[in-house]
Structure formats: structure tokens, C-alpha cells
Amino acid sequence: MSEDAGIFRSLARVDWLVLLVVALYALALGAPRNLYFALAAYGAFVAAVRWRRFPVQSRNARLAIGAAVMVAFITVVAGQTGGPASPMVNLYLLPAVVAAMTLPRAGAIVIFAAVVLAFLSLVAGEGPLPPAGILMTRLFGTVGPWALVAYLTQSLAVAIVSANRRIEEMAERDSLTGLLNLRTFKLVLHREHGLRARDARGVYALLLVDLDDLKALNDGHGHQAGNRAITSVAGAIQRAIRSTDVAARYGGDEFVIFLPEATSEVAETVAKRVRNHVYSSLFPVGERLQRVTASVGTASYPRDGSEPADILSAALLRARRDRELRQQSAEPAP
């Protein structure tokens, strides 16, 4: 909603700018009374379309209606001030650019087609249409630059949106693993926790995955080998969980997984699957393939706590206990 509100505020400035330019032009020329009626009507529409209770609530529909009405208003103004020779004809570029910036390509094409038809109606209002060749030359000379500006505007807008999405994704993701970073994961966790706590129903589970012996791998083979181990574990986790689960890098060699609507029993099953996937994932270190193991701790809401921090702490403690138990079981008998 905040993004839509920003768009509508920006477009309101365009609408009021059109009104201001036309009003100043009308005052300077002593335009006919009909033009002032058109100014008042368009001003009322501009105020109405920004109203929260405007009958049309769809963002794209409201933008399209606003651009179409702007085209109609400019046509009336140009018709009252010289037809296709009026300087006000240049205002047609504004709805074309606005549509190119804010609407899908199909909508922008429709608005631009309305601009072309409106300009042709002004030409037709002068009298009999000129021969087709002259008409096309005139149309191309006037409307062609508008089409080029609208096309370049939409291309630029698409590139900006795509770049913003990449920037947002980079801000949300861990650069090494591609998983969510801890800040973003905590936002997701607190949102999901709040939904369940508010309704006093629903469960979820957390898994804390701790890579074993990363320090020894770094000391023996370098940090590049350690990074390969981390990315290998991240890939194993993604293969082991559902598409509805959320995984993130919790720290240097730790990962956390959110399992929505999962009981403690389900969490233990997923934990076992994660261990197996991690162990079966091989990655190159020098000329050899290496494997690592991971300790996994599970905790669930509301069994292990009423707050996300409590559940994370419980999962962390169980991951450490899991490591201790496996180390003890690996020790040779005295």
C-alpha cells in the first residue's frame, strides 16, 4: 500500500501540473468559458480519483482511468486553443509517459493508441482529412517522437524495477549460500510467530543445523575449502526441506530452518533427513572429494517456549547435545 500511495502522490503532481499549465495558458490567451468548465471538471476528477473510496480500487485500473481522462482533457483543451496546431498538443506526451512508467505493456499501448486517436480527432476537426501520405507524414512527425519517448521510458522503468528487485534480494540473502540472511529470517519468524500467537493456534518447528569441525577443515585446507563445505551444507538443506519451509544462514557455520505447521515429531524426521543429505553431499578439496557432518537440534512452538528467542535457544542447545552424543558414540570403548 505504501508503494501505491507513493505512485499516486507522484502522479497527482503530474495532474496538477497539467491543470496549472492549462490554467496559465487560458488566462494568458483569454480562452473561452468552456475551457474553464473543462478545468473545473478535470480538477474535480483529479481530486476524486485520489479518494480512498473511489469506486475503482484496482491500482492499474485507477492509473489507466486517470491517464485516459487526462487524454480526454488535453483533447478538449487543444480543441479550444487551436486544434492540432495548439501548443497544448504537446501535453499528450504526459499521459503516454505516465502509462509507460506505471502500467503493464498492454495498458501502455492502449493509452498511447488513445493519444493517437485523440490527435487524429483534432486533425479531423479542421475539415476534410488530407491525403493519406500527407496525413501519415504529419502523424509520424508529431506522434512518432512521443512513441519513442514512451518506449524508452517503459524500457527504463522495467530496468529500474528489475534492478530494485535484485538489490532487495541481495539485501535479504546471504552472499555465500543464497539462503536468507539472519536479519530477514528473524523478520519472517516473528511475523509467522505473531500470526500463530494471535490466534492461539497453530504450531511450527525450528531446526538449528551446526556444521561439525569447520575450524579443522579451514586450518587443514584453507578458507576456500571451508566455504565449499558451507555451500555444500546449504545445498543439502535446500534439498531436504519442503518448498514451504524457510532456511537461513544463522552464523558462520550454523543454519536455521523454519518448518510451518510442523510438530516435534515432524521436526525430528526432517532433522534426520538433513543429517543424511549433508553426509551424502561431497565437495572437492584439492584433488579429493570431502564430506562433512552436521549436528541438528529441533524445537517447536508452543512446546519449547512462547517466544521465538526461547525456541531458537532450545534448538541451539539440542544441536550441541546432538554433537556431544554423536562424539561419545564414536569414542572407542575403554
Image (cartoon, rainbow, N blue to C red):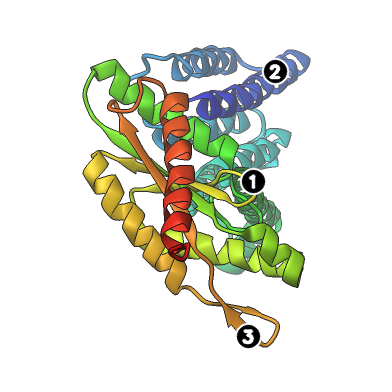
Q: CA distance from mark 3 to mark 2?
A: 74 Å
Q: Is residue 122 left or right of residue 191?
A: right
**First along the sequence among labels 1 and 3:** 1
**First along the sequence among labels 1 and 2:** 2
Amino acid at circle 2? Leu
The residue shown at (33%, 43%) is 259
Residue 314 drawn at (x, y percent)? 42, 32
Amino acid at circle 3? Arg
Category of crowding for the residue at label 3, using alpha-carbon neighbours closer than 10 angstroms: few (below 14), some (14–19), many (at least 20): few
**First along the sequence among labels 3 and 2:** 2
Q: CA distance from mark 1 to mark 3?
A: 41 Å
Amino acid at circle 1? Asn
Q: Which residue is mark 1?
A: 164
The residue shown at (61%, 69%) is 133
Q: Which residue is mark 3?
A: 288
Numbered disc total? 3
Mark 1 residue element: helix
Mark 1 or 2: in front is 1
Q: Which disc number belongs to residue 203?
A: none
| Whether residue 199 is visible | yes
Q: Which residue is mark 2?
A: 20
Image: 42 above or below 318: above
- Residue 35: name its quadrant: top right
- Residue 182: name its quadrant: top right
